[in-house]
């Protein structure tokens, strides 16, 4: 006699509306993260952190960091 192995439950299908809501949540999270990064860059600059260190943490070049955040008034 063969023993039946239990099946894993398949994930429930999500409707388009649910997926749109999920996307909306991701956009909100992205906006909140952008604000948090902007504030942290401003704080680091006020504390005297050099652009090369900030750029390394952001994963961009020093020039790219300066251009982006100087435009936002975070020098």
Image (cartoon, grey):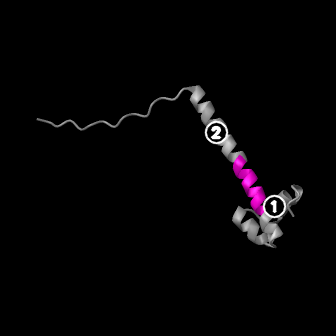
Give the image location of residue 36, x and y in percent: 73, 55
What residue is shown at x 74% (from left), y 71% (from top)? 53
Q: What stretch of residues is rendered in magenta?
A: 32-42
On the rendered image, what quadrant is the C terminus found in?
Answer: bottom right
Location of residue 18 (image quadrant): top right
In front: mark 1 or mark 2? 2
Q: Is disc 2 surrounded by few (<14), some (14 to 19) or many (20+) residues within 10 Å?
A: few
Where residue 31 appears, x then y in whole percent?
72, 46
- The residue singled out by tag 2 in the image is 25
Crowding at mark 1 (Cα within 10 Å: few <14, some 14-19, many 20+): some
Q: Is residue 3 left or right of residue 35?
A: left
Residue 45 numbered tag = none
**Element class at badge 1:** helix
Report the residue at 85% width, 60% height from top. 74
Question: For the residue labelled by badge 2, is the local secondary structure a helix, a strand or a loop?
Answer: helix
> Going from the N terminus, do you reach mark 1 or mark 2 first?
2
Vertical placement of 6 versus 45: above or below?
above
The image quadrant of residue 67 is bottom right
The answer to whether 27 is drawn above or below residue 13 in the figure is below
Q: Is residue 62 magenta?
A: no
Asked whether, in this view, residue 50 is left or right of residue 21, the answer is right
Residue 71 location in percent, x, y? Answer: 88, 56
From the viewer's side, name the closer residue of 15 and 37. Answer: 37
Q: Residue at x 51, y 29 (%)?
A: 14
Report the residue at 84% width, 63% height from top.
66
Which quadrant of the rendered structure holds the N terminus? top left
């Amino acid at each position: 006699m063969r023993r039946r192995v239990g099946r894993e439950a398949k994930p429930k299908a999500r409707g388009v509306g649910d997926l749109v809501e999920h996307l909306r949540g991701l956009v909100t999270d992205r906006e909140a993260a952008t604000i948090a990064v902007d504030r942290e860059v401003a704080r680091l600059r006020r504390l005297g952190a050099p652009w090369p260190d900030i750029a390394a943490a952001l994963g961009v070049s020093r020039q790219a960091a300066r251009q982006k955040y100087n435009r936002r008034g975070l020098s």
